[in-house]
Image (tube, grey):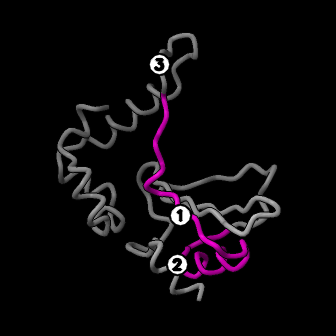
């Protein structure tokens, strides 16, 4: 998996995600990634038996988490304006997530809501370049 992604400049991707968001498969293919091999390697890696796993496995999502001092409904409405599809009140429900997804939640009794977005694989669920930054969310929610 690491070999497949060695030609991806993470810093460039984070600075300018638009090309990837418009066409993730094309973006990766243009950088020498064999999409089918990557998908097979990823599936093999993440579905291996627990007994074979060692160490700490996690994805650090801190760069994709935005804390917003706003009621959850107001935040969800702002994000939904650029989403292709939204689902609300899904606690205790099984939902299917596509490549690029976001979720919001707010702990009972707290003023702050949390917006998390992540990318899994290859397909678009939010129009390219329309993931709201913290500054954009702030402007929308004023």
Q: Callout 2: few (<14), some (14-19), or many (20+) C-alpha neighbours within 10 Å?
A: some
Of labels 1 and 3, earlier in sequence is 3
Disc number for residue 137: 2
Out of 66 and 100, give the one closest to the viewer: 66
Q: Secondary structure at mark 3?
A: loop
Image quadrant holding the N terminus, namely top left
For residue 37: magenta? no
User: Mark 3 to mark 2: distance in Å?
Assistant: 37 Å
Label count reads: 3
List the residue tagged with mark 3.
55
Image quadrant holding the C terminus, namely bottom right
C-beta proximity under 8 Å, tags 1 and 2 = yes
Residue 79: image x %, image y %?
A: 58, 75
Q: Is residue 83 left or right of residue 1?
A: right
Residue located at (18% from left, 54% from top): 30
User: Farthest residue toward the top?
Assistant: 51
Residue located at (58% from left, 63% from top): 115
Residue located at (45% from left, 25% from top): 44
Residue located at (48% from left, 59% from top): 100
Q: Secondary structure at mark 1?
A: strand
Q: Callout 3: few (<14), some (14-19), or many (20+) C-alpha neighbours within 10 Å?
A: few
| Magenta segment boundaries in residue numbering | 57-86
Of labels 3 and 2, earlier in sequence is 3
Q: Is residue 140 left or right of residue 30?
A: right
Out of 136 and 21, give the one closest to the viewer: 136
User: Mark 1 to mark 2: distance in Å?
Assistant: 9 Å
Of labels 1 and 2, earlier in sequence is 1
List the residue tagged with mark 1.
66
User: Mark 1 to mark 3: distance in Å?
Assistant: 28 Å
């Amino acid at each position: 998996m690491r070999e497949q992604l060695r030609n991806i400049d993470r810093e460039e991707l984070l600075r300018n995600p638009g090309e990837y968001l418009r066409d993730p498969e094309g973006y990766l293919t243009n950088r020498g990634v064999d999409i089918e091999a990557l998908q097979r390697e990823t599936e093999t890696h993440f579905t291996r038996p627990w007994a074979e796993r060692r160490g700490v496995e996690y994805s650090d999502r801190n760069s994709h988490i935005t804390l917003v001092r706003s009621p959850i409904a107001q935040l969800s409405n702002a994000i939904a304006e650029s989403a292709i599809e939204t689902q609300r009140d899904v606690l205790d429900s099984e939902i299917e997530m596509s490549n690029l997804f976001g979720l919001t939640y707010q702990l009972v009794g707290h003023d702050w809501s949390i917006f998390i977005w992540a990318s899994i694989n290859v397909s678009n669920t939010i129009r390219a370049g329309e993931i709201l930054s913290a500054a954009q969310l702030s402007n929308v929610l004023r």
